[in-house]
Image (tube, helix red, strand yellow):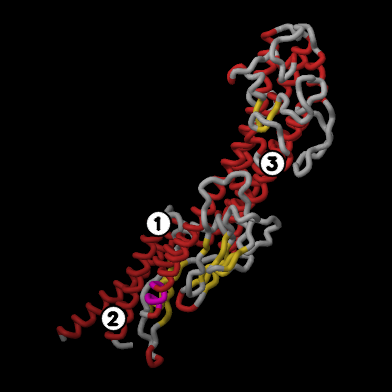
Amino acid sequence: MTLSLALANAVTGLRANTAQTELISNNVSNALTEGYSRKDIVLSPSAPGGQGSGVRIDATVRAIAPGVTEARRLSAADAGDGKARAEALARLAAVTGEPGEQFALATAADAFDAALAATADTPESAPLLNAAVGSATNYVSAVTRVAAEAMALRTEADSSIAKQVNVVNDTLGKVLSLNMEIKARQVSGGDSTALEDERARLIERITSMIPIKVVPREFGEVAIFAKNGAQLLDGNVFELEFTPTPLVTPDRTLANGGLSGISINGFAMRIGEGGNAGFLDGGSLSAAFELRDSILPRVGATLDGMAADLIGRTQGLAADPTLAPGAAGLFTDGGLAFDPANLTGLALRLEVNPAVDPDRGGEPFRLRDGIGAAAPGEVGEDSLLRGLQDAMRELRIPPAGTELTTQRDAAGFAAEFSASILSRSATSDSELAFRQGRTDGLAEAELTRIGVDTDQELARLLVVEQAFRANARVVQVVDELLERLTNL
């Protein structure tokens, strides 16, 4: 080996050592940077014409763990689905309340039953009559409060869909731009790893919304597909299309055209129909559709059925001689008699009859003497109150179209509804904890494979330092030999 070749070899070694040192320092400085993947330099022997001439830097590569990353992304979507459901059900549970809490639905139902019983035992008591009307008003308020929350949650779900669609489209557009930059870098022989990190961080924006699979293409580009097959990005962006609705009222549904579905480049996509069978199912986006179009409408329908049952127990009450058959009783549809053809949204319109409500010009004595009574009657008369009490305690089959399952009295339906909401909320919280725990475990496993271990990097730095010293020593020895030759 000639001195010039030895010098050339040492110089390539120094160049490789310098590049490795820069890379290790970059790894260490980004050890806590979210989304950063560890970088490594690929080296190979340089031997043009079969003659060894040092070392060659082939490429800078990112640490990847495709299997773990895909599993973690799919789990993140599952957790996103669970989080959307859990948050909505938690809000419903909060407004429904635990039995025994002051403003809980079941508490209000029981309080009205107790107030009615006390008034029937002492019909001459004006304070008890007032208290009974107040309890009826509180009962109605509890029902309408839950119904209003369900409607608000549907509106928020629709708004959430619109926001998520915008984020997905924006992200896909940016990933497409990065794809083109990465391809240009790789074609020109440049380092594209920083751009690949940025692309990976962008993709993370949508992993909780849609369960995705990222497929490598030539020159570092990637294609993105939903787990169930919807094409999102592959050379071009396949945009999601959705039209938001400012206020989602109970009568608005996807089936009647009152609400927007989702489409990709003009083709309607199934989503949020249950069973994870839709092309975009499995993340927070499909959960928002299922909440808006299925879960919350069923809650609303159950409340409407309960409201219809309440009205039906007092409308045209036989014990009230002042009421014509079918006339509005204690509970009304916005102050009027209830028409079964107008069931949708009834829980929002449920009211105590203005005739007994002192806040609206009514008189509580009509609870004892009849809704249509013009003047107070016999103060000791309890037959109407007993009839009203019997009507409220009568066991009835669950209203059609509701999630109620067992024959109960009015308070029993309120208790069953409350128990169902509270149970579903607790179950969804438990399921979310499991899904999030699984996602966190996969994220930790992924980090172990692609993240920066500072101890390992510092150990590598010591090895590089030793190699640098050796190469520098070779340069120094060659310099000394050349100096001796020059002085001969």
1 or 2: tag closer to the N-terminus: 2
Left or right of 468? Residue 260 is right
- Residue 98, given in percent of the width and then of the height, sits at 67, 29
Q: Nearer the viewer, mark 2 or mark 3?
A: 3
How crowded pointer 1 is (Cα within 10 Å; few <14, some 14-19, many 20+) is rated as some
Instruction: Name above or below for residue 466 compared with residue 340.
Output: below
Decide if residue 465 is in sight here. no
Q: Secondary structure at mark 2?
A: helix
Residue at 25% x, 74% y is 476
* Most foreground residue, 424 or 107: 107
Question: Looking at the rendered structure, which numbered label has been put on residue 30?
Answer: 1
* Most foreground residue, 124 or 151: 124
3 or 1: tag closer to the N-terminus: 1
Residue at 70% x, 41% y is 343
* Most foreground residue, 233 or 406: 406
Q: For the residue marked with disc 2, what is the amino acid?
A: Leu
- Residue 22, given in percent of the width and then of the height, sits at 34, 65
Please name the residue that numbered disc 2 is placed on. Answer: 7
Magenta stretch, overall SS: helix
2 or 3: tag closer to the N-terminus: 2
Q: Which residues are magenta?
A: 181-186
Decide if residue 245 is in sight here. yes
Outermost residue to the left? 487
Please name the residue that numbered disc 3 is placed on. Answer: 342
- Residue 232, given in percent of the width and then of the height, sits at 53, 67
Q: Secondary structure at mark 1?
A: loop
